[in-house]
Amino acid sequence: MGALDRAHLIEAAVGRYLDNNVAAWALALIIIGGAVIFVLVGHALVKRFLRTWLAESSGQTVAGITAMVMTMFALLLAFVVVNLYNSYDSAVNNVALEATSSSDLVRDSGNFPLPARGGIERAVAQYVVQVREHEFKTLSEGHPDPRAQQLLDNLFHAVQSYEPKTNAQQAFYQAALDQLHAITDERENRIDAAETAIPDPLLYLIILLAVLTLATSLLINTHHDGLDVAVVVVLAVVVSAGLYTAVVLQYPFSGSIAVSSDPYYSPSLVQLVQKYT
């Protein structure tokens, strides 16, 4: 494993650890509060050591540069946040579709003889319990649950071991196979979604633009110290709040807004699980 791969794994582990172990309000306080402290300290240092840089003649130039950098930051952040939200929304839909396909598979197997139907129902119940009670936790830590994959393989075996005899049974069998493949596809999508994060180059660029935005804002001079402080604090809050939003939208199965396993607690699946537990 190369140095870049190790750095990426460490970064992902740290990001997931913060999401899973730091409350949302505390994480917001760290990011936003840190940015506010940064600009307040920076403002004091500029006023003390770089007062000659705050000449009135350069005010328009500084304001223009700050606006340009902040516009670039805002555009890039909006692009990243929209993509992260779309990935999060897709993960929510994947979970709902997988749960629905599980219910539909049980419904389609209702026309099978009792031994085959019972085997499929039991396999679905075991898989659903493993996913909702164990795999969601492992996904929050960045990896799928091997036991869930094994139970999905058992479900495949339960379906494929049945041989339909009549045309009606053949039609329901094909429908059951379609639902089984849908479960597999949605599970793969769910696992892939658990890795959704800001690519490293974009992350570094966002941080760079955020720092440059705050740094250039320190050179804005309105000739009123109170207003200068208010301007840099407002910019710090806006910039850091945007960064916070991007951070919490990473890793859809981790953190305070993690994708819920509620679809696996639908009445039909709850009834099925109760039947075989």
Image (spheres, grey):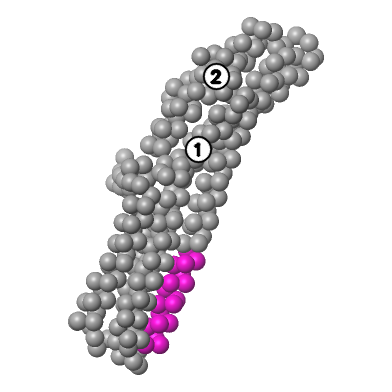
Alpha carbons under labels 2 and 1: distance apart: 18 Å
Q: Position of residue 103 (x, y in %)?
A: 63, 25
Q: Please tell me whether the stretch drawn in magenta is mainly helix, strand or loop.
A: helix
**Outermost residue, left direction?**
49
Q: Position of residue 216 (x, y in %)?
A: 34, 76
Residue that appears at 57% across and 14% down: 275
Which segment is the magenta one? 59-76
The picture quadrant where one finds residue 265 is top right
Q: Amino acid at mark 1?
A: Ser
At numbered mark 1, what does the secondary structure look like: helix, strand or loop?
Answer: loop
Does residue 8 appear in this view?
no
Looking at the rendered structure, which numbered label has been put on residue 133? none
In the rendered image, residue 64 lying in the magenta stretch gets the answer yes
Residue that appears at 37% across and 83% down: 62
Front-most of 133 and 65?
A: 133
Q: Amino acid at mark 2?
A: Val
Residue that appears at 33% across and 57% down: 29
Front-most of 73 and 37?
A: 37
Relative to 159, 44 lies left or right: left
Dot 2 surroundings within 10 Å: few (below 14), some, or many (20 or more)?
some
Relative to 126, 201 lies left or right: left
Does residue 83 appear in this view?
yes
Please tell me whether residue 252 is drawn above or below residue 99 in the rendered image. below
- Say which residue label 1 marks: 260
The mark nearer the N terminus, 2 or 1, is: 1
- Say which residue label 2 marks: 273
At numbered mark 2, what does the secondary structure look like: helix, strand or loop?
Answer: helix
In the rendered image, residue 193 lying in the magenta stretch gets the answer no
**Outermost residue, right direction?**
167
